[in-house]
Image: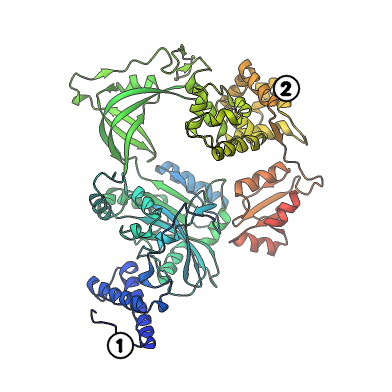
Amino acid sequence: MSQSNRGLSQEQAQERIQLLREKIKKLNYDYFVLDTSEVSEAVRDSLKRELKALESEFPQFITPDSPTQRVGSVLSGRFPKVAHISKKWSLQDVFNEEELQEWIDRIQKIVPNEKLEFIAELKIDGLNITLHYEKGKLARALTRGNGQIGEDVTHTIRTIESIPLELQRPETIEVSGEIFMTRKAFQEMNKQLPEGEEPFANVRNAAAGTIRQLDPAVAAGRPLEAFFYSLGAHELEKVPEKQSELLKLFLSLGLKVNPHRKILHTAADIMRYREHFEKMRDELDYEIDGIVIKVDSREQSERLGYTAKAPRAAVAFKFKAVQSTTIIEDIQVQVGRTGTLTPVAHLRPVEVAGVTVSRATLHNEDEIIRKDVRIGDTVIVQRAGDVIPEVVEALKDLRTGEEKAFIFPKTCPVCNSHVTRKEGEVAYRCDNQNCFAQKSERLFHFVQRNAFNIEGLGEKVIIQLLEEGMIADPADLYMLKKEDLMSLPLFKEKKTQNILDAIEKSKTVTLDHLLFGLGIRYLGEQGSHEFATHLLGEKKEYSVRELLHDAEKLKLEDLLNMEGIGEKVAQGMIGFFQDEKNKELIKKLDQVGIKIAVQKAKEATQLTGKSFVLTGGLETMSRDEAKMRIKLHGGKIHSTVTKDTDFVIVGTDAGSKAKKAEEMGIMILSEKEFLKMIG
């Protein structure tokens, strides 16, 4: 409609605007969700133009949920961080039929003698997003972030036409899904980029980069789509009993879901579904990297519960690693924090599984010899598990005679020290603990979040400090002075003070974080926690000096009796604490004032020997942290509610476990009550 809107009264304009909005919303719902349309796209566009013209003439009637208001205001800074209402979990991966069957067997043991029914959905290669609707209106859109806190990207999500600004019913609901870009849209977007601007490497990067634009007008010009599949917090009167019914509910609300879903009953059914879509993945107009298998029953899913990282009721069944060919332009050796020398192939950039790859691991000398890989070879490259690039084999028929064999170095490529390979091991190691590469890698490890958590000390700053001779080991960080940092390039007053404050704050650390930060070979986060628990026992105080004293007395058999400590880890720990240089470092950490914070058990023994079940999302801590606190106070963790359960901790969006606990007369604790219990 192109005629002028002049002459309309305010009442007439308001009525016309309301009618246009409702019609356009209906057409958008038909087009984007149901893939049908009663009119052509040109008609829909014409109605939108009329609405925009009317709202321009009568701005007092503009509302945030209008189809014309999908472009919001331009943000001027970084995105605000916002806590999710309910925690966002990752999925466990399986890669073959054997691992799939093992998963089915595991969950069947938890629900014995019960029939399991599965729903299969495609695993979209995009950006996870969570939407909050309040009484049917889009209130907020958050990226997944770390699962507990995401970035508020509402301003760009509002530009995606397949996402309704208003649901078909006024529900208050939290839903999660995947934002993606079609292959065609991706190709067109890269073609239209301004000259000199770097094209996006893959569709996921393009989608993520678009969502994180500060200017929503940029996002509005890039066609994105969305599929939804997960329910979080809600105020629904009735929750669907099955995942398959939940997807139908989403459709009825105006939320688009992937059409390629199917109910399956056996591992063989799942394998056929996976093989079908692995063969036709290139025929789809969007990228997929596998399928997702979920237990269809919501009640069974809730009873299956969660592991430390993932729900037990669902897995991501990844496709076979996608392969490609390219040329090895060079092979260089990297040196890690424990001195391990790892050969890395530098490749002519190639796209593998939707990602541009320019480097790939060759693992060790034995692998290079076994595969007969040479510089200049044409090689097959794959992303193992669709993540880590590796060289599979060299295509020897394509050799020209110009290829060069790689000679593994006998000295460290960084410090020229001698390298050794112990009997029974495949890796060469640099013997020089003062090697710059090892020192820098050890320091990178020491300052990371799961160790001493010193914010502001990134790789560039650490390398600067090492090169200037200001530090040689982690303990030296605590002797840095303001004038030291101010003498470095680009260091201003605020940056310097922030780093010094972060260093001072890190002087008090829990024992498990201290142990992990030391970088003991093979000792990960879980092993550090188990070892710390063993050392602390019932102690209310503990010092770095005591750690050194206790560690020097370690015996292999004692370590092997600890939960979570295997032989390789035990050997690595004994070797570490017997090394004089490591002992000196620990003494030095004590001298610079490192204090160990012991999480004291509550004097009253309410938790000792008691069993706990967790359900729902927690606000002030992760589920892993809650479990760790329960263990530190002598409690036990169970995944299901039984007559032996003593307490059920209920968070947001709690499921059937809370109801079952109430029916069985088991003590229910809120998060606040639990925190009060442990003091």
Please state if 653 lies on the left or on the right of 91 as rendered: right
> Alpha carbon of mark 2 to alpha carbon of mark 1: how far?
90 Å
**Residue occupying image coordinates x 29% and y 44%:** 198
Number of numbered discs: 2
Q: Position of residue 545 (x, y in %)?
A: 72, 25
The amino acid type found where label 2 is placed reads His
Q: Which residue is labeled 2 in the image?
A: 549
Disc 2 secondary structure class: helix
On screen, residue 570 above or below 57 = above
Q: Position of residue 348 (x, y in %)?
A: 27, 32
Dividing the picture into quadrants, the one containing residue 568 is: top right
Q: Are marks 2 and 1 in contact (CB under 8 Å)?
A: no
If the image is split into quadrants, where does the N terminus sit? bottom left
Residue 258 position by quadrant: bottom left
Which residue lies under the disc numbered 1?
Answer: 7
x then y, percent, for residue 125:
36, 50
140 lies left or right of 394? right
Given residues 253 and 511, the one toward you in this image is 511
Q: Which mark is residue 630?
A: none
Q: Which circle's residue, 2 or 1, is located before the other in the chain?
A: 1
Q: Secondary structure at mark 1?
A: loop
